[in-house]
């Protein structure tokens, strides 16, 4: 280690610090040391990108110095460190690029199986969302251009509503038929499926015919509210993130997972 040049030591230090930095950014958000804007946007996306770009630059410089500029015989150890730095930095930057692309492909954070009449949340859930400073819920027929959170989306997206976007992006998202099961059995199946999937604060409101639960992401602790409306013939689902603009497709995937788990509980309806 002592014999390594500054650029090799810098690569090793940055490569070791990157995962620690991302871990601190995520867990700090989860336990409430700072808000998601700092943890995700400023630290992870901003600081993390700069660190990865810095690692890529130093690694490329090191690689050139080891393989081209130095007149001494090539040092395999130094070359290996430089190549490792390029790979690590490249993986991080590619991940950021993939996230940006996924965000563009999934521009909203409120998804339901019934876009004409999406399931409504209880007053308790709405109070919890308001207390946490969550995004307000929006009418599914309103163009995004009329919603402040989406004021800066592209013109082609601004004229579309939640209902149109859900229909276009998630064409396979659909209600779950009850089949021969009763509404009571359907509610019990949803609640049990939520528990299987790790939901918290699961509540059944038999009078309203709804089951609610809160999903929490592992690293950042982002909370998404989900409600299932049990009708006479089918179960409709809705999942909404509390913060952010894009959900990276998480809510649609969660609905599909809950729908499948509930179907199993109902005997494959």
Image (tube, rainbow, N blue to C red):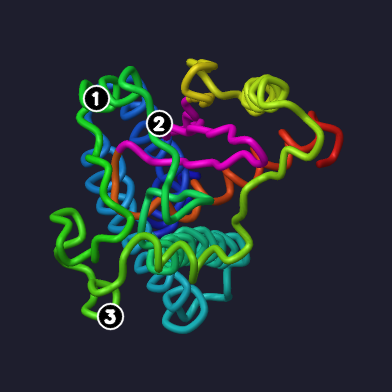
Percent coordinates x, y for residue 240 in the rendering: 40, 41
Quadrant housing residue 146: bottom left
Which part of the image, by quadrant, shows the C terminus?
top right
Query: Among all residues in the image, which is located at the extreme bottom?
Result: 68
Region of the chain picked out in magenta, as a range: 214-242
Give the CA separation, mark 2 to mark 1.
Answer: 10 Å
Whether residue 165 is situated above or below residue 139 in the rendered picture? below
Viewed as shown, does residue 221 lie left or right of 231? left
Q: CA distance from mark 3 to mark 2?
A: 29 Å
Which comes sooner in the sequence, label 3 or label 1? 1
Q: Which residue is mark 3?
A: 156
Q: Is residue 225 magenta-colored?
A: yes
User: How would you classify the magenta stretch by its main secondary structure?
Assistant: strand
- Residues 70 and 203: in front is 203
Q: Residue at x 63, y 35 (%)?
A: 232
Seen in the image, is 232 located left or right of residue 65?
A: right
* Residue 223 disc label: 2
In the structure shown, which secondary structural element does the residue marked by tag 3 occupy?
Answer: helix
Classify mark 1: residues with Cα within 10 Å, few (<14), some (14-19) or many (20+).
Answer: few
**Percent position of residue 252, x then y:** 53, 51
- Asked if the residues shown at circle 2 and circle 1 are in contact, with their CB atoms under 8 angstroms apart, the answer is yes
Residue positioned 54% across, 64% down in the render: 87
The residue furthest right is: 267
Work out whether mark 3 precedes mark 2 in sequence or the reverse, and give the earlier one. Answer: 3
Number of numbered tags placed on the structure image: 3
**Are the two marked residues, 3 and 2, in contact with CB atoms closer than 8 angstroms?**
no
Query: Circle 1 sits on which residue?
Result: 132
Q: Depth check: give the residue in front, 23 or 200.
A: 200
């Amino acid at each position: 280690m002592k014999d390594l040049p500054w650029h090799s030591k810098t690569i090793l230090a940055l490569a070791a610090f990157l995962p620690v930095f991302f871990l601190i950014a995520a867990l700090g958000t989860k336990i409430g040391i700072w808000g998601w804007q700092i943890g995700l946007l400023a630290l992870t996306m901003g600081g993390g990108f700069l660190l990865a770009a810095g690692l890529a630059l130093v690694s490329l410089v090191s690689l050139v110095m080891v393989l081209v500029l130095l007149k001494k015989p090539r040092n395999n150890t130094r070359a290996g460190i430089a190549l490792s730095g390029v790979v690590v930095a490249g993986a991080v930057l590619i991940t950021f690029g993939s996230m940006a692309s996924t965000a563009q492909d999934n521009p909203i954070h409120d998804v339901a199986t019934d876009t004409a009449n999406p399931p409504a949340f209880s007053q308790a859930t709405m109070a919890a969302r308001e207390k946490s400073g969550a995004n307000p819920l929006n009418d599914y027929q309103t163009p995004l251009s009329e919603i402040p959170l989406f004021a800066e989306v592209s013109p082609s997206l601004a004229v579309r509503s939640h209902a149109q976007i859900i229909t276009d992006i998630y064409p396979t998202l659909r209600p779950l038929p009850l089949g021969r099961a009763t509404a009571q059995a359907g509610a019990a199946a949803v609640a049990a499926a939520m528990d299987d999937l790790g939901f918290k604060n699961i509540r059944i409101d038999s009078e309203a015919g709804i089951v609610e639960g809160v999903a929490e992401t592992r690293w950042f602790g982002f909370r998404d509210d989900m409600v299932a409306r049990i009708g006479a013939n089918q179960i409709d689902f809705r999942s909404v993130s509390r913060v952010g603009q894009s959900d990276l497709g998480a809510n649609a995937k969660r609905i599909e997972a809950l729908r499948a788990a509930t179907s199993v509980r109902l005997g494959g309806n």
